[in-house]
Amino acid sequence: MNYNISITKVKQPKYKSLDFNDLPFGRIFSDHMFVADYCDGNWQNPRIIPFEPIAMHPASMVLHYGQAIFEGMKAFKNKQGEPVFFRPEMHAKRINASAQRLCMPTIPEDLFLEGLHQLIGIDHNWIPTTENSALYIRPFMIATDEFLGVRPSETYKFIIFTCPVGAYYSKPVSLYAEQHYVRAVNGGVGEAKAAGNYAASLLPAKLAQEKGYDQVMWLAAPDFKQVQEVGTMNIFFVIDGKVITPKTDGAILKGITRDSIITLLKDKGIEVLEQHVTIDDILDAHQKGTLQECFGSGTAAVVSPVHTIIIGEQKLVLPDVENAKIATFTKSTIEKIRSGEIEDTFNWIQPVRILEQSLA
Ligand code: COI
């Protein structure tokens, strides 16, 4: 479908005064945002406007009953300086899977993608060019009915805004296996990128940090044996040369970086098992000396290596992350595909379409 996206540009772009060498994550916002409203059963009035606060009625349903979903994705400049997306259609599909679970309307994939191309086309000067920096893109949808009855909202707002972010240096982390609080259960909303999942993770994360550990390793209720995720990321283990990641069974986010890692490793002939993995498997492997690597995967960090795992009274120290071959290979391969340094054999990269009117 051809969407007529109206465009109102800022008078004075702010990127000209931006220090591209100092880009803390999620604090600097680009000049424009894409907005569409859902009303009377349709997405209406798609528009690109100057980035600005949104006025909300205090009874807006999102504020009370939490119909809120989001995506996290990135645009980059490749070696030739051309702006590109990484697997944008996967994010379009995933936000719709989240929408369905939260009883929200889906967004036509072509509207999601068109909004994305036009917004990033207009703000392409915000994409940083230093190594491994990116434009972080945050599409999200919220319920806007002004009503306190508990039912699905009939109106929604879909917004995309962006933040330039510097290279994400992920210092190796320690994990605390959480055996009291739970992130998600099968049949719940753990598979969706629902805002509430992140709210539910904050207290256990804070308690783990107070104990001196960086991130929570989430386990499945009710027996707290099966590993699900780490912090806000999917988790991978390398045990005795085999790569193992928990299978997505309803409580685990279907990570796009997770999928990319599995695809890359299988392509290289490395065995990847998507199966249940328990803390007993990890303890056993550590005792046998076969626990070689553990890392988290997500859009923000790509790969985040783990140096220690705390399970109950036991402290498992992993081999030096400098020698973590799988983590290093996957992170650098994804980064090289994004920069165009190696061939994009999986068609993951999509050039940003820049309209003539967007050229500054
Ligand atoms: C990611 O690691 O990609 C995330 O989902 C983190 C984000 C919520 C900031």
Image (cartoon, helix red, strand yellow):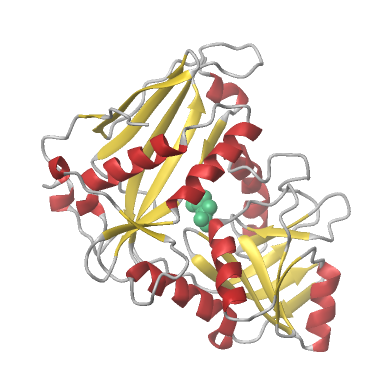
Q: Is residue 297 above or below residue 101?
A: below
Image location of residue 96, percent across then percent down: 55, 37
Position of 291 with respect to 192 (left or right) is right
Image location of residue 24, percent across then percent down: 35, 57
Q: Residue at x 78, y 82 (%)?
A: 286
181 or 82: nearer the viewer:
82
Q: Residue at x 54, y 57 (%)?
A: 256
Q: Is residue 10 above or below residue 131?
A: above
162 or 124: nearer the viewer:
124
Quadrant assignment, res 312: bottom right
Q: Residue at x 17, y 34 (%)?
A: 9
Image location of residue 298, percent across then percent down: 53, 60
Image location of residue 211, percent across then percent down: 67, 62
Residue 299 in view of the camera: yes
The outermost residue toward the front is: 1
277 or 283: nearer the viewer:
277
Q: Residue at x 48, y 69 (%)?
A: 170
Residue 194 in view of the camera: no
Quadrant assignment, res 194: top right
Position of 333 with respect to 3 (left or right) is right
